[in-house]
Image (spheres, coloured by chain):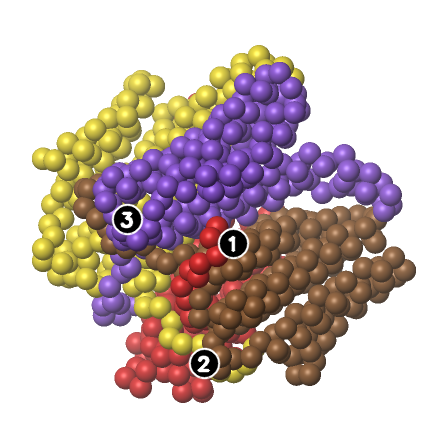
Chain colours: A purple, B brown, C red, D yellow
């Protein structure tokens, strides 16, 4: 390679955001990596086996929706930001830790037995994820790095609603498998939180 | 890290596109991850075993071509767009779901037995993929976010042709393994659709 | 998500290059994914086992160097290009196919037995890779999309030299395991080609 | 695809940085790929098994912190750079080699037995990583590609402190498992180095 200069690199803020997007993109794609293929010599056997594996497929779709939603919120959160700084990079790295852990806690969730412990591991990871996003939001607001035309009140309410719904599901899981309903409630609560 | 500001982050539209590109890049690269290595102590054994595995290698090449084509259409589709908005982010996320599922449905396709069910799983995923791209296109046209110099009629016809070819292959697979020919016809039909 | 527009997406040329960079980044990182961990309860056993696995580690380093070099050439090749078009996207996708296949052919190379067939599979993939880069270069030159200040003669010679070195190694492998020396010669030949 | 030109590609410097970010993003996400899921039919069995696996989880968190810190330093290092050139691309590729190797050396670290050899493999990889970053920094300073408003003295001291801490841990591991404490000292030493 010749020694000529190759131009200026992109800014740290651009790198931080594209690095985060790449991590989320990899985590969301890895979710499908270990999905079990239904065995079966005949079409009937295949369909029967696929039905037995519905728990794994549902967990994949739940995690895809959770990570996709987290990414949308991250996108919205930084859309009104005029400059990245303060403690935002640290909270962002901790948020990425929860994203990186999501394919793992999805495998934890779908393994056999120990329902409450597995459920709580997953829900706690997602609650932490929401919490770190909320801390990013707060550090943006505090450091006054927000476009003055925008208010983050709706995003803050949505994040609080999501995080609380995941937290509430943990004690519910000690009592009943219907704790999954708390997660189905998450998008509804989030929407209500955004409109409130 | 010092607390100084690091500049403004990239726009939500840039992030949405690069996030999508990263997901597609990972999915297309993961296709080769579980390709079986031919065993064999001698060159003749190696070639014999490689010939036996030709189904796996063909499925890899088909999926590479399918995902590569989907990405080209996505690239073309957004090339004339002046602004991202409306329902496009939602359709885009559902499109990414079909891309993320493609390495999995490729493994489904190449497993033994149950030809019609495996074939239909793969073809239905790709038909959905085409449908979500088409919905993206429609939301762009409806929200009037298209560069007025460009017409998307050719891209629309191409997408409809591709999706219909995958859909038609599903009932054909109930009757004969020659249903694969419908897929080979896809690029020809797509080209004819683009020219029509 | 609100329905507001999110700004214009990046250009097709930017997307093509970042998509390619993402594919190369994933392929180069996956090379280390299946490296075998040396077993051993004592430090001496560990070192002994690590020495036995040196073939796997060498293959990893070779493929890292090959993919890294391919990426540098791709980077240089497009550095003087003022506009992407013509057949370049098609050759680029075929180039990416050889990159995506590299972790797989590295596993082929390090499996036991059938030296000539395994060696030829690897070398042929890399020769194809060089050839597709060379076709990209030619389509750039032909479509007159090159910054007139730049000459691509050195890059062309380098690519031809690399491709020829990989091609020559294939018949040599039919005779002797020293065919690896042809690869060690690749960077020297490439440098000579660049200076010629 | 029509033959129309698609615009100019991004600059080599932008590509080098985004390529690096993508490699780091993949390596950091792959760290969680092989984390073992605790087995157990009851919540108590699950928690007991999870506690037994704490070494794997700790190694994941250590490597996440190490790679995350390396990325932050890389980000800071290039933030004041006005132009990429000289030997920086070569040192950057060698730095990426250590990053790509990190998920592998993490697996080496957590396997059973041979403590000193496994510990030294991991620590040496991270010391090399710090060294290559330091060589990048030096090549930037030497080629006079630094924004004159910025001084890299703090970053240089931090890198030297980190690298030395990893190097010191290697002989310590020959004597005692407490060598891990040297790594815990790394961030403290780095901070002290930055302030000195």
For image coordinates 24% across by 26% down, the residue present is: D185
What is the residue that sits farthest to the front in this orientation?
A196
- Residue B69: which disc? none
Q: Which residue is mark 1?
A: B23
Give the chain of mark 2.
Answer: D
Where residue C122 appears, x then y in whole percent? Answer: 55, 60
Would residue A38 be found to the left or right of residue D54 on screen?
Answer: right
Q: Residues within 10 Å of mark 3 (few under 14, many from 20)?
A: many
User: Would residue B76 be visible to someone looking at this image?
Assistant: yes
Which of discs 3 and 1 lies nearer the camera? The answer is: 3
Would residue A141 be found to the left or right of residue A182 on screen?
Answer: left
Q: Secondary structure at mark 1?
A: helix
Real-space Cα separation, disc 3 to disc 1, in angstroms: 29 Å
Q: Which residue is mark 2?
A: D5
For image coordinates 32% across by 62% down, the residue present is: D14
What is the residue that sits farthest to the top in this orientation?
D44
User: Would residue B177 be visible to someone looking at this image?
Assistant: no
Q: Residues within 10 Å of mark 1 (few under 14, many from 20)?
A: many
Q: Which residue is mark 3?
A: A146
Q: Secondary structure at mark 3?
A: loop
Real-space Cα separation, disc 3 to disc 2, in angstroms: 38 Å
Question: In the rendered view, would you say C134 is above or below C123?
Answer: below
Where residue A166 appears, x then y in whole percent? Answer: 51, 29
Would residue A112 be found to the left or right of residue C14 on screen?
Answer: right
Which of discs 3 and 2 lies nearer the camera? The answer is: 3
Give the chain of mark 1.
Answer: B
Question: In the rendered view, would you say B67 is above or below D68?
Answer: below
Q: Nearer the viewer, residue A84 or D45?
A: A84
Q: Secondary structure at mark 2?
A: loop
Q: Quadrant of the C terminus of chain D?
A: top left
Query: Contact (CB < 8 A) between labels 3 and 2?
Result: no
For image coordinates 20% across by 34% down, the residue present is: D190
């Amino acid at each position: 390679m010749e020694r000529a200069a190759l131009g200026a690199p992109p800014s740290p803020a651009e790198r931080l955001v594209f690095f985060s997007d790449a991590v989320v993109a990899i985590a969301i794609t890895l979710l499908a990596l270990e999905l079990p293929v239904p065995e079966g010599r005949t079409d009937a056997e295949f369909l029967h086996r696929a039905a037995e594996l519905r728990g794994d497929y549902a967990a994949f779709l739940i995690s895809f929706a959770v990570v996709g939603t987290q990414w949308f919120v991250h996108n919205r959160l930084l859309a009104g930001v005029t400059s990245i700084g303060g403690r935002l990079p640290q909270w962002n790295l901790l948020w990425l830790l929860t994203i990186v852990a999501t394919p793992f806690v999805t495998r934890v969730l779908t393994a056999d037995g120990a329902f409450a412990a597995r459920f709580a591991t997953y829900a706690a990871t997602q609650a932490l994820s929401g919490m770190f996003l909320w801390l990013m939001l707060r550090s943006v607001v505090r450091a006054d790095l927000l476009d003055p035309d925008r208010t983050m009140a709706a995003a803050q309410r949505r994040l609080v609603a999501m995080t609380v719904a995941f937290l509430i599901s943990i004690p519910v899981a000690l009592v009943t498998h219907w704790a999954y309903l708390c997660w189905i409630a998450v998008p509804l609560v989030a929407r209500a939180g955004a409109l409130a």
